[in-house]
């Protein structure tokens, strides 16, 4: 009958298991759990309204009038080319409605 010898206080390269036994490997999910907890804390703290550095959409370009749509598109392209996550709202909705919907997302 073979029993695995327990090695205490030895570095991993010194603690070699008996012949016929493989070294056990344990996979920890602690790192993912820490990330999940951090995201949950941030979500609760910011109430879903992420800070600029963490937000999936950092800027929303909303033109005042449909005649300004071309300029709004140009501003949007400039922001995206600078590495900023931006969207543009050029629909025919009223200005206040555009702002209200942009705050929700």
Image: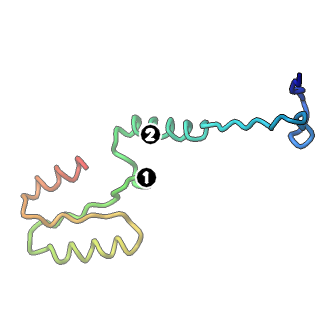
Residue 89: x and y, percent?
18, 63
Q: Height in image: 67 above or below 54? A: below
Q: Height in image: 74 above or below 96? A: below
Count the marks.
Answer: 2
Q: Name the residue under label 2.
A: 42
22 to the left or right of 16: left
Query: Which quadrant of the figure has residue 75?
Result: bottom left
Mark 2 or mark 1, which is nearer the start of the sequence? 2
Which residue occupies 37% across, 55% down? 56
Residue 73: x and y, percent?
22, 74
Q: Mark 1 points at which residue?
A: 54
Q: For the N terminus, give its image quadrant.
A: top right
What separation in Å lies between label 1 and label 2 (alpha carbons)? 10 Å
For label 2, the SS is: helix
Query: Which quadrant of the figure has residue 32?
Result: top right
Residue 68: x and y, percent?
13, 74
Q: How crowded is mark 1: few (under 14 residues within 10 Å), some or many (20 or more)?
A: few
């Amino acid at each position: 009958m073979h029993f695995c010898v327990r090695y205490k206080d030895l570095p991993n390269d010194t603690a070699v298991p008996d012949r016929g036994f493989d070294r056990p490997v344990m996979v920890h999910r602690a790192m993912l759990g820490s990330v999940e907890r951090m995201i949950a804390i941030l979500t609760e703290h910011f109430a879903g309204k992420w800070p600029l550095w963490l937000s999936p959409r950092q800027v929303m370009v909303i033109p005042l009038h449909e005649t300004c749509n071309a300029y709004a598109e140009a501003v949007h392209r400039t922001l995206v080319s600078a590495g900023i996550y931006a969207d543009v709202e050029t629909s025919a909705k009223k200005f206040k409605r555009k702002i209200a919907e942009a705050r929700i997302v």
